[in-house]
Image (spheres, helix red, strand yellow):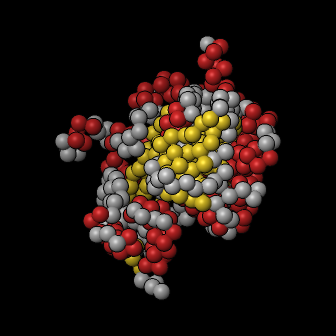
Amino acid sequence: MNRQSAEVVIIGGGAIGTAIAYYLTTWGIKPTLLERSDICSGTSGACDKAISLQSKTPGLHLELAMTSAAMFSSLGRELQCDIEYYRNGGMIAIENESQLSIMEAFVQRQKSYGLPVDIVTNEEARRQQPALSPKLIAATYSPADGEVSPLKLTFGFAKAAKQQGAILRTGVMVTGLVINHGRVEGVLTNQGTIPAGVVINAAGIFAPAIGRMAGLDIPIRPRRGQIIVTEAVPPLIRGALWSARYIVAKHNPDMIRQEDPEAAKIGVGLSAGQTKEGTLLIGGSREFAGYQAVTTPEAIGAILRHAANIIPPLRTIHVIRTFAGLRPYTPDGMPIIGPVEEVGGFIMAAGHEGDGIALAPVTGKLVAQYVASGIMEKEIKGLLLSRFQKAAIES
Amino acid sequence: MSDVIICRCEEVTEDELRAAIQEGACTITGVKRRTGAGMGLCQGRTCRRLIASMIAEQQGISAAQVMSDTIRPPVRPVRVEDLLCEYTREEAETGRD
């Protein structure tokens, strides 16, 4: 058997796994990252580019996103790579009174956590975003929202980690874990056994399969999001643009069921942005459809109908591609981060659903700090896997 | 050194593609995610075969053995307006529009 020495093994080469690899190297730890396919080949390579603060639930989720957002501004310099990070602000388009009352309450709670965000009139919103429909009744605006290239970010983390001594191995499939006396001792792969005192499960939608190798039940499910790409057009959307329905779909799907049952079934809401090259990225949907990362005409039609109501000039622009990503959903919408009680040395870092890009820096930093120093920040204490086990016992 | 443009839509050069393949990209999709080649208006219809042969050359296999990228609808540019109609999966599968 081919034996290689590695103290810390990370499973998964997406934004989360590569971020952890990079931050571990800043502590002088040189981890081995195992990826079954290619770096950035899964969820991180099939998403949009918004780093949204406004869409986060006020509380721990928003606090994590704010910590992460503060890290983004210097990250490109740190990684010596242009990650195309821009803090251009973000807007949520509000279509009717019932959405407005929900958004007013949401904005109030976000403000109490220190997020700069306000409700603006339709006229003010259209001064900033002339493409918006005059039929909207209002919008929210936050200057804190930003954008980043998820591809540049993930490859940037990977490259910087490699330069600082991390070993990145692609095409390596994890087949099992070596566990002795309740402690992890190694990782079995299709290319031999790798000794490891610490194993970090950053496998995203595949995290449950890795968890089962440690006898753990990890409640992550793939939730499909479909996105439309248009031809390059002159500047049309400034910063990030969502519809209130997107926020409601994320936090209160029942309400959309009353507004539009067809759209509710596929969780349609608008999340739009424009790349540096000029292409528009228009999402999105939220569906449980197993592991099938395919696009469907029903969802593409429903997303575009919703999008064209909010951005009427879209109607004459050409679609050049559609794609789908599978987001690692958890029952409470929060990622699972930190050690597990059952197996020593086994650490979770998965389940970020659509927030993995926004939360990659803070996740990487928290996990690396825990592995290197044993210090568990209060954020991790709120994100442990055990919260689901306790919930199951209580119910 | 070659600054010959292989992906004309996104203006990606042969050198940039070779660097991505060197870095570990072993599929057309892997090259695309690293360089943006194939992400433009023609969606790789022009450069796909050239990139496949560059990967094949590097790996010592035939271009046919290089894993194809995922070809997604609408395949050629379609106006948003034309996609707004409520069409069902059945219609899509029987090729009607």
Work out whether A19 lies above or below A392.
below
What residue sits 75% from the left and 40% below the top?
A: A63
A31 relative position to B92: left or right:
right
In this rendering, does residue A77 appear at all? Answer: yes
Work out whether A116 lies above or below A149.
above
Work out whether B92 lies above or below A102.
below
Q: Position of residue A381 (x, y in %)?
A: 75, 33
Q: Which of the two residues, A83 or A381, is positioned nearer the viewer here?
A: A381
The quarter in which the C terminus of chain A is drawn is top right
Q: Position of residue B8 (x, y in %)?
A: 39, 75
In this rendering, does residue A240 appear at all? Answer: no
What residue sits 79% from the left and 42% below the top?
A: A374
Q: Which of the two residues, A197 or A235, is positioned nearer the viewer here?
A: A197
Q: Position of residue A307 (x, y in %)?
A: 47, 45
**Count of picture labels:** 0
The answer to which image quadrant residue A388 occupies is top right
A300 relative position to A128: left or right:
left
What residue sits 48% from the left and 86% below the top?
A: B1
Q: Position of residue A272 (x, y in %)?
A: 53, 49
Q: Which residue is situated farthest in the bottom direction here? A: B1
Q: Which residue is situated farthest in the front direction here? A: A1
What residue sits 67% from the left and 51% below the top?
A: A7
The answer to which image quadrant residue A76 occupies is bottom right
